[in-house]
């Protein structure tokens, strides 16, 4: 009984310390002051668009079809993926690749006013390549690409949160910075 009591107190103390310092799991933050968003993208039915839409909905943000019905409009201007050789072996064969994923966005207010100018977000990963195991390395590259897209989505949502908080704390008729 004493051991259980000590374990419970220790668990409560650790939980209090962790939550008190502001630590939280990545991706579990809430986006304040945003109720609805429209996503403008050429690749409307692509995996990136779908993942962004799901992430916004998971943050309790409604993704609407019409830009005029949305509080904010995320405009995806460009999305690029590249894969380049990062290093070669002594036998002049690829031993490592660098994967880069980029997305260029703008965030507009409901009236079309730009709140975040054209911004390019990027992330990259390196992975070892083994020509004797091409299929599993391609699977690994696809997994890394999905992780990179998730990272870019977190960056977009973070920018949206910053824009929303900036626009709500700005005095009326003040120029946006």
Image (spheres, grey):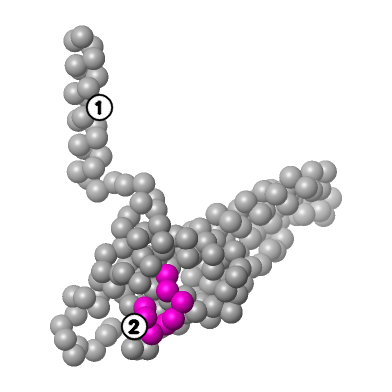
Q: Is residue 117 left or right of residue 81?
A: left
Q: Nearer the viewer, residue 12 or 98?
A: 12
Percent across and percent down for residue 46 are 61, 68
33 and 11: which one is in front? 33
Q: Residues within 10 Å of mark 2 (few under 14, many from 20)?
A: many
Q: Specify whether residue 112 is in view.
A: yes
In primary-sequence order, the first of circles 1 and 2 is: 1
- Dividing the image into 4 quarters, which one contains the C terminus? bottom left
Residues rendered magenta in the picture: 63-70
Residue at the disc numbered 2:
109
Q: Nearer the viewer, residue 153 or 37?
A: 37
- The residue at 18%/90% (across/down) is 173
Q: Is residue 47 left or right of residue 163?
A: right
| Residue at 25% from the left image edge and 75% from the top image edge | 166
Q: With respect to residue 112, does 146 lie above or below?
A: above
Relative horizontal placement of residue 93, taking residue 46 as reference (left or right): right
Nearer to us of marks 1 and 2 is 2
Quadrant of the rendered image containing residue 32: bottom left
Q: In the image, residue 99 lies at what x, y percent?
A: 63, 60
Q: Residue at x 72, y 60 (%)?
A: 85
Sort mark 1 into few (<14), some (14-19) or many (20+) by Cα contacts within 10 Å: few
Q: Is residue 74 magenta?
A: no
**Which residue is label 1 attached to?**
11
Residue 54: image location, x then y, percent: 47, 60
Q: Residue furthest left?
A: 171
Along the line of sight, which residue is nearer the eye, 17 or 94? 17
Q: Quadrant of the N terminus?
A: top left
From the viewer's perspective, is 18 left or right of 53? Answer: left
Q: CA distance from mark 1 to mark 2?
A: 45 Å
């Amino acid at each position: 009984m004493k051991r259980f009591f000590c374990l419970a107190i220790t668990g409560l103390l650790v939980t209090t310390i962790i939550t008190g310092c502001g630590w939280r799991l990545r991706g579990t933050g809430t986006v304040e002051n945003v109720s609805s968003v429209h996503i403008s993208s050429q690749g409307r039915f692509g995996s990136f668009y779908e993942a962004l839409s799901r992430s916004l909905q998971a943050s309790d943000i409604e993704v609407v079809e019409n830009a005029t019905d949305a509080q904010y409009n995320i405009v995806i201007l460009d999305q690029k993926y590249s894969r380049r050789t990062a290093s070669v072996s002594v036998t002049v064969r690829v031993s490592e690749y660098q994967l880069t994923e980029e997305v260029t966005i703008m965030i507009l207010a409901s009236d079309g006013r730009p709140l975040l100018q054209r911004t390019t977000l990027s992330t990259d990963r390196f992975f070892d390549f083994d020509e004797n195991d091409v299929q599993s390395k391609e699977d690994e590259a696809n997994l890394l690409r999905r992780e990179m897209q998730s990272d870019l989505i977190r960056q977009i949502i973070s920018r949206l949160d910053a824009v929303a908080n900036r626009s709500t704390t700005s005095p009326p008729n003040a120029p946006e910075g």
